[in-house]
Amino acid sequence: MHAIWISLRRWSAIKRVVLLPGLWIVISSTLGTQTITYAGRPATPASPTADPTFEVASVRPNHSGDLSSGEHTGRGRLTVTNDTLKQLILVAFDVKDFQIEGGPRWLDSDRYDIVATTGSSEQITNQQLRPLLQALLADRFQLKAHRETKEMSIYSLVVAKNGPKLTEHTGGGGGDSSTNPSTGNIRAANVTMTTLANSLSQVMGRPVIDNTGLKTKFDYKLVWAPPEQTNSTAPSIFTALKEQLGLRLESTKGPVEMLIIDTAEKASEN
């Protein structure tokens, strides 16, 4: 065993640090008296935390022809049913459909079932799920992507000429919001205008920025006729916003963070 001696001189005191494999000792020497002042293992710098990964993952193509799909997280477990790779990317990278650019043609057509476990009994949160799913997509789909900001068409959500027609929330409780673009319905309670802007982004297929200046939390319901419902008597979403909430959308330009798909391959069944 070899020792390395390092002398540090300060005024009349001399300190020597003995470095041994797995052990370090500091010896103080003052006016001829030598005393061991500390003995223990050195503090090693923390190694970078490894990227989280699932312990076991099964990925199988789904050829059912069914269009229903979804993801469910539980205690150390993720279950995906009939998702496309594009749907998985939306969850993994926390982006909306209009923010994805590039990728193979099958990105939004081929569907997969996934069962993956972490080896832990802890509940998987959304924050934990994203890096886990990103690692799985990189491993099984050879997914490579990067983020890039581009100038694009966006909407600005503003107050209409005659003022807002919103109900301020009273009482406690948490916020709740549901959006169904296919039926033309948004319902929310105890939420901000930022939440409404995010909901409208899903409907409009482009970013919606809250520029209403309204800071209070509101309860609201918005009903409109989706473009495909030609026989509906409900108004368009632009008219519905003005008549029901006293708000309007202005088309403008702005920076949008995009997720560019560089490469992706079909996952093999296992």
Image (cartoon, helix red, strand yellow):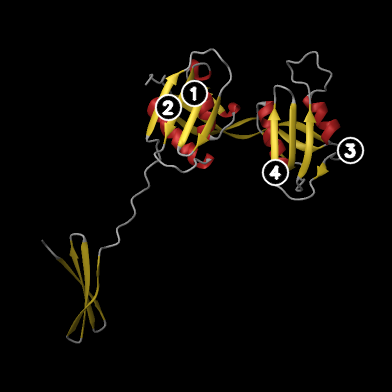
Residue in view at x 26 percent, y 63 percent: 42
Instruction: Give the class, few, some or many, for how many residues have Cα within 10 Å of label 4's Cα (few <14, many ≥20).
Output: some
Work out how far the residue at label 1 is from the one at label 4, CA to CA, in angstroms. 30 Å
Three-letter amino acid code of the residue under disc 2? Leu
**Mark 4, residue position:** 175
Residue 242 percent location from the top left of the image: 83, 32
Q: Quadrant of residue 206?
A: top right
Position above or below: 114 against 192:
above
Residue reaching furthest to the right? 162
The residue lying toward the viewer, choosing from 70 and 162, is 70
Hey, what amino acid is under mark 3? Answer: Asn
Q: Quick one: SS at disc 3?
A: loop
Q: Disc 3 designates what residue?
A: 162
Task: Inspect this view and state whether residue 181 appears.
Answer: yes
| Left or right: 249 in relation to 205 | right
Q: Of callouts 1 and 3, which one flags the residue occurring earlier in the amino acid sequence?
A: 1
Q: Which is closer to the viewer, label 1 or label 4?
A: 4
In percent of width and height, residue 10 lies at 26, 79
Compare residues 137 and 206 and report the one nearer the observer.
Answer: 137
For the N terminus, which image quadrant? bottom left
Mark 2–mark 3 distance (CA, rounded to whole Å):
49 Å
Q: What residue occupies the far bottom of the structure in this picture?
A: 31
Of circles 2 and 3, which is in front?
A: 2
